[in-house]
Image: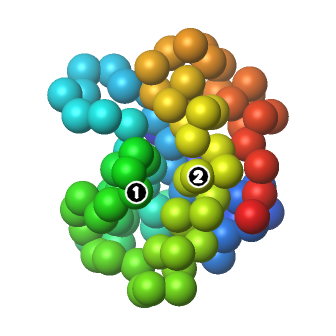
Amino acid sequence: MANLRPQTTGLPFVVYISQRGNARHGPRVKVSPAPRVQLDQMASYAVSPLRHVAGPRLGAQEEARLGRWVALNAEVLIGYWDGSIPYTEDAIDRLKPV
């Protein structure tokens, strides 16, 4: 899992992206208030369509901002998830902030 700083995403929290691995679900992003992983503070959101899956839900405004960022970057997030973008650096280079 790669953590993306707020300066990269334009969001007021850390976003985590990952490749599929052995997951049995579709593309997801995780969000957290800090870069240090604390599972009780980490929320998971499905990418398409954006929906809360697990963990503490963001506030309405933050969730709307996450939705805009995910929509803007859906192609990259899905490509990284499915491995068609194999390297983290390549995915990060393609991401656009909100």
The answer to which image quadrant residue 39 occupies is: bottom left
Q: Is residue 22 above or below residue 74?
A: above
Number of other residues with Cα within 10 Å of mark 2, as a class: few under 14, some 14 to 19, many 20 or more: some
- Residue 46 picture location, percent across and down: 35, 50
Give the residue pinned by disc 1.
50
- Give the image's coloring scheme: rainbow
Q: Nearer the viewer, residue 3 or 70?
A: 70
- Residue 50 picture location, percent across and down: 40, 57
Residue type for callout 1: Leu
Query: What residue is drawn where x is 77% and y is 49%?
Result: 96
Query: What residue is drawn where x is 51% and y is 42%?
Result: 17
Q: Is residue 24 left or right of residue 42?
A: left
> In the drawing, what numbered circle is on residue 13?
none
Query: What residue is drawn where x is 25% and y is 21%?
Result: 22
Q: Is residue 39 visible?
A: no
Q: Is residue 17 above or below residue 83?
A: below
Query: What residue is drawn where x is 60% and y is 33%?
Result: 75
Number of other residues with Cα within 10 Å of mark 1, as a class: few under 14, some 14 to 19, many 20 or more: some
Q: Is residue 38 left or right of residue 68?
A: left
> In the drawing, what numbered circle is on residue 71?
2
Residue type for callout 2: Ala
Whether residues under marks 1 and 2 lie with C-beta atoms below 8 angstroms apart, the answer is: yes
**Helix, strand, or loop for circle 1?**
loop
Q: Nearer the viewer, residue 51 or 54?
A: 51
The answer to which image quadrant residue 6 occupies is: bottom right
- Residue 48 picture location, percent across and down: 40, 45
